[in-house]
Image (cartoon, rainbow, N blue to C red):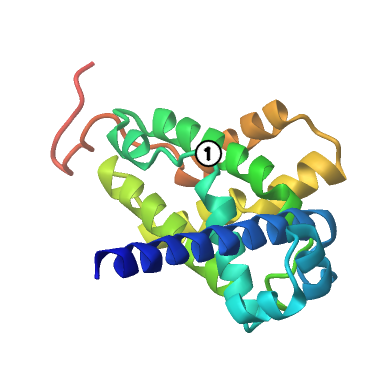
Amino acid sequence: MAPRAYNNETRQQQQEQLKQRIAESAARLHAERGVLATSYAEIAQAAGVSLPTMYKHFPDLGQLVRACSGHVTAHAPAFPTDEILAASELRTAAQVLVDAADRLHAYFEPWKSWREANRIPVVAENAEQQRVRMVQLCEALMARHGVEGPHHEIAAVWESLLDFELWHRLVRGHGLSRQTVRAHLLSLVLAVTGPQPTTPPLRPNQRSLP
């Protein structure tokens, strides 16, 4: 029984490695020409497998895109959530957040610049999940630093300012340097919160000292 179990495990590992090779090839081609313009036949050729093998492991585009997304995301820059939430000042937290968003946008640009989110359900689902997580993180920051005003509304504006589309337009459309874009985005997200009081407001009958 032991040899059979070993053979099954080895075969399973080989199949996983094959799927990984297909996903890597697909991700590379998707970055070059977009998901919808890349055929299964082209991916099969790049991965060195037959077309039936492609369909065996990835019967539909959704499964293939999920595998590609997993491969691409696994090599993405780490997102410093803990560092952002642990920052002692809102400005510091915002700086780390803006810098992290810039690094991720630059990394994912080859895939996101094709703007296929609205045409591929799996991509749209991933984009929505990312949007929700960013809004939740920004809301947590508003609460953590006692920002006045509607936290969800402010967080929604922060998320919109840090979205890939604005970054891409400024960097690629207008040719601004990433350093310049980071500086402007930091100013914008902080401006949205408005001036925050550093001392408790005076009570109606309380007078300030001369």
Q: Say above or below: 60 vs 175.
A: below
The one nearer the camera, 42 or 100, is 42
Secondary structure state at the residue bearing disc 1 = loop
Give the total of numbered labels.
1
The residue depicted at 37 percent of the width and 58 percent of the height is: 136
Taking the image as shown, residue 131 lies to the left or right of residue 34, namely: left
From the viewer's perspective, is 165 left or right of 34? left
Q: Is residue 131 visible?
A: no
Place of residue 130 in the rendered image (x, y in percent of width and height, measured from the top left): 50, 61
Q: Position of residue 8 (x, y in %)?
A: 38, 69
**Residue 6, position in %: x, y?**
33, 62
In the image, 185 versus 70, the foreground residue is 70
Amino acid at dot 1:
Pro
Q: Quadrant of the N terminus?
A: bottom left
Residue 133 visible to an observer of this rendering: yes
Residue wearing tag 1:
77
Front residue of this view, candidates 153 and 199: 153
Residue at 46% in and 32% down: 96
Based on the displayed image, in which of its 4 quarters is residue 205 positioned?
A: top left
Decide: is 88 above or below 74: above
Residue at the spot 83% in from the left edge and 43% down from the top edge: 172
Quadrant position of the C terminus in the picture:
top left
Q: Position of residue 197 (x, y in %)?
A: 32, 35
Residue plotted at (34% across, 29% down): 89
